Amino acid sequence: MFMNKTKVLLILTQDVLDGARVLAGKATAALKLPVSLQIVLRALIEVGLKQKDRPVLLANIEDQAKAVRLKRARRHEQG
């Protein structure tokens, strides 16, 4: 299943992480299988990538891209 693996560092807000943990707990209860945070995050990424034309997804991408740009500009201004 994971023949071609790459490691990635994700920096998430505590709210997002907590939501993913809640989803892992609900999935564990519903499926009666242990579901880790990693499994949940991997599934969310895979599902999100399949929804290329969703306006909400595009808006979220735009918000995050603008936040990164703003953070970099502030860092550049500070020297």
Image (cartoon, rainbow, N blue to C red):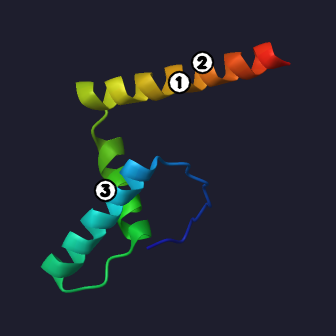
Which SS class for mark 2?
A: helix
Left or right, 21 with respect to 66, comes to left
Q: Read off the residue under disc 3.
A: 19
Q: Read off the residue under disc 1.
A: 67
Q: What is the three-letter code of the residue carrying label 2?
A: Leu
Q: Earlier in the sequence, mark 3 or mark 1?
A: 3
Residue visible at 36% across and 43% down?
49
Residue visible at 38% across and 50% down?
16
Which SS class for mark 1?
A: helix
Query: Separation of disc 2 and disc 3 at Cα?
Result: 26 Å
Q: Read off the residue under disc 2.
A: 70
Residue 2 visible? The answer is yes
Query: Separation of disc 3 and disc 1 at Cα?
Result: 21 Å
Check whether the beta carbons of the residues at disc 1 and disc 2 lie within 8 A of each other. yes
Q: Earlier in the sequence, mark 2 or mark 3?
A: 3
Which SS class for mark 3?
A: helix
Residue visible at 60% across and 18% down?
70
Q: Position of residue 5 (x, y in %)?
A: 58, 65
Q: Position of residue 65 (x, y in %)?
A: 51, 24
78 or 3: nearer the eye?
78
Q: Quadrant of the C terminus?
A: top right
